[in-house]
Amino acid sequence: MNEPTSRQPDDAVHDPYAALQALASPAVCGGCGAVHADGHWAWSPAPPGAAATTCPACLRERDRQPAGELTVDAALARTHRESIIALARAVEAREKRLHPLQRIMDIAPVAPADGALTITTTDPHLARGLGEALQERFRARATYAFARGQHLLQVALTP
Ligand SMILES: [Zn+2]
């Protein structure tokens, strides 16, 4: 039997990327320039004496380990591909401005012959936000499920 899919992850401390947030404060990411201070990340000037680090989003990009994965059904993707990508980029830009770790990693076809589209993210909240925005815009249906020991949020968008 499958578990209900709306459960929130409750074992974030076991997520190797989340665990990295318990690092020196203040610290600045050498990859993207995000600054970690007081327990969260922001786009702010690095304070004097900030330790050098790599943020979880840059680590995920380096390791190609997304925290969110949105799959757009082939029928939807074929009809609305450009609008879907434009809306996804707009949602990302809005979220990333306040939350530096919420980024799109890749937008790619699931397989060359298949029409489906997959959008991977560095944070599960962004994948959820994309699912909600696309669902509303295209009157589609978004379903959510956690995978990989709750560390990957998979969102499926269907007509
Ligand atoms: Zn970074």
Image (tube, rainbow, N blue to C red):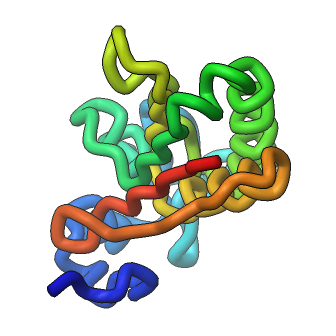
> Residue at horizontal 46%, vertical 33%?
118
On screen, residue 67 above or below 45: below
**How many numbered discs sit on the rendered protein?**
0
On screen, residue 15 above or below 17: below
Q: Is residue 140 left or right of residue 51?
A: right
Q: Is residue 23 visible?
A: no
Q: Relative to the observer, which residue lies in front, 42 or 124?
A: 124
Percent x, y of residue 15 = 23, 69
> Residue at horizontal 32%, vertical 19%?
111
> Residue at horizontal 56%, vertical 69%?
40
Residue projecting furthest to the top: 112
Say which quarter of the image contains residue 136: bottom right
Q: Relative to the observer, which residue lies in front, 62 or 90?
A: 90
Q: Is residue 137 visible?
A: yes
Where is the N terminus found, in terms of image quarters? bottom left
Say which quarter of the image contains residue 9: bottom left
